[in-house]
Image: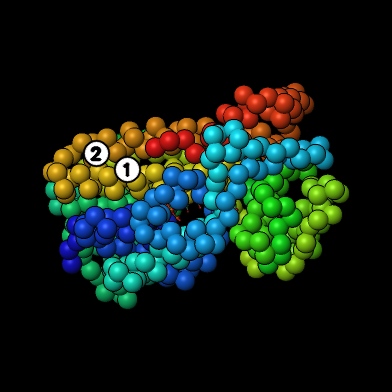
Amino acid sequence: MRTQVLIVGAGPSGLLLGQLLHKAGIENLIVERQSGGYVLGRIRAGVLEQTTVDLLDEAGVGARMHAKGLLHGGFELAFDGKRHRIDLQALTGGKSVMVYGQTDVTRDLMEARASAGLPTLYEAQDVSLHGFDSDAPFARCKMAGKEIEIRCDFIAGCDGYHGVSRASVPAAVIQTYEKIYPFGWLGLLSDTSPVSHELIYGRHERGFTLCSMRSQTRSRYYLQVPLSDRVEDWSDARFWDELAQRLGSETAAGLVTGPALEKSIAPLRSFVAEPMRFGRLFLAGDAAHIVPPTGAKGLNLAASDVYYLWQALGEHYREQSQAGIEHYSARCLSRIWKAERFSWWFTSLMHTFKNEPAIDAKLHRSELEYLISSPAAQTVMAENYVGLPW
Ligand code: RFL
Ligand code: PHB
């Protein structure tokens, strides 16, 4: 088997890259370890920056997003029982974010790929990558027990944090930076109307809370929990009760509870791998970097990587230019480190840290008070939240 660009992973990075390359007339094949149904079952991101929305439009998959997505011109910070609005539109000259679930983005991309007749090998086992430091890279995998070989010009490693692509790179040529936070997020999805029409990020002595949504009738809530907790420890009743306590009586009065459609715990991590290109292998999305979800940046960073890679490969095939390929890693990393910094800052500000020195708690409170009283500080927060330019 042969293709121009072999894409490893059918998450949002791999599917979006595949769609954009196809529009540019570049052949691509995706190999994915899981089934399509499994990929769609993962409930993750909810907030898209305008540039991500624009790229989804460019890929021709924006119609349902514009019909069903919710444009948010602000969000709220809650602490000490009070809510304070960050007016994104006023602070950024009219910018907003789109609340539209990653599951929906993935489904839109999968449907577009299927209707364009583009090949995806789901349930590909034991994918291995070879020869990417030469002009003739190739991959091997097993399909229904039978070994196949795929030759290609380039490999795009879009296979997430636990994928094979980054792991295939010799340790001597890659450097990684990592911070693991001492807590996780317990998420709950329910068919109940959201407690507020905008997102609420809450700091409370019992832990961080996020009130998000997927539509006017579907809510997504998160609670900071210790890493030792398991989903089984959290009945629906315990979740709603804890959420209400952290929100405080005024906000909790408007909380509508209901059975969980999904509940899961995600660990929080900051991680960057440098560089992001190794000969003819490119890393993109979570394969190269992870941010804690507080800043809502993970999927949006995946989109900017894909944008730079699509441009680079387009220039290569159209103009025989290597410039985009040479600059891919530096372009991505410049944006990634800024989003890493913002996500780390927002996470540190809003979560409670066990055994935190009393002075740190005081400093966090002082920073929050400064933030809600200073238009300059709010502008910094807002320009990062809506997304820095590409
Ligand atoms: P994915 O989504 O992990 O997809 C990788 C795909 O590769 C496959 N794979 C393999 N395939 C073949 N062979 C192998 N050896 C393979 N190993 C893995 C996997 O099965 C999978 O299908 O990575 P991708 O495409 O780079 O997408 C990244 C995003 O999923 C991620 O950054 C976001 O979900 C992060 N994130 C958020 N991002 C935002 O921009 N806004 C948000 O509001 C937001 N909220 C979140 C989040 C992530 C969360 N969790 C669970 C970590 C909220 C949460 C709770
Ligand atoms: C979500 O809706 O899943 C979501 C929203 C904002 C975040 C993280 C997750 O910062």
Corner quadrant of residue 36: bottom left
Q: Is residue 67 above or below residue 348?
A: below
Corner quadrant of residue 208: top right
Instruction: Tell me residue 257's x, y (percent).
Output: 77, 63
Looking at the image, tell me whether mark 2 or mark 1 is earlier in sequence order.
1
Residue carrying label 1: 308
As helix, strand or loop, the secondary structure at mark 1 comes to: helix
Q: Is residue 123 above or below residue 347?
A: below
**Residue depicted at 55% across the width and 62% down the height:** 68
Q: CA distance from mark 2 to mark 1?
A: 8 Å
Q: Residues within 10 Å of mark 1 (few under 14, many from 20)?
A: many
Left or right of 258? Residue 271 is: left
According to the image, what is the colour scheme of the structure? rainbow
> Badges 2 and 1: C-beta atoms under 8 Å apart?
yes
**Residue depicted at 22% across the width and 48% down the height:** 314
Residue carrying label 2: 324
Residue type marked 2: Gly
Instruction: Tell me residue 43's x, y (percent).
Output: 56, 60
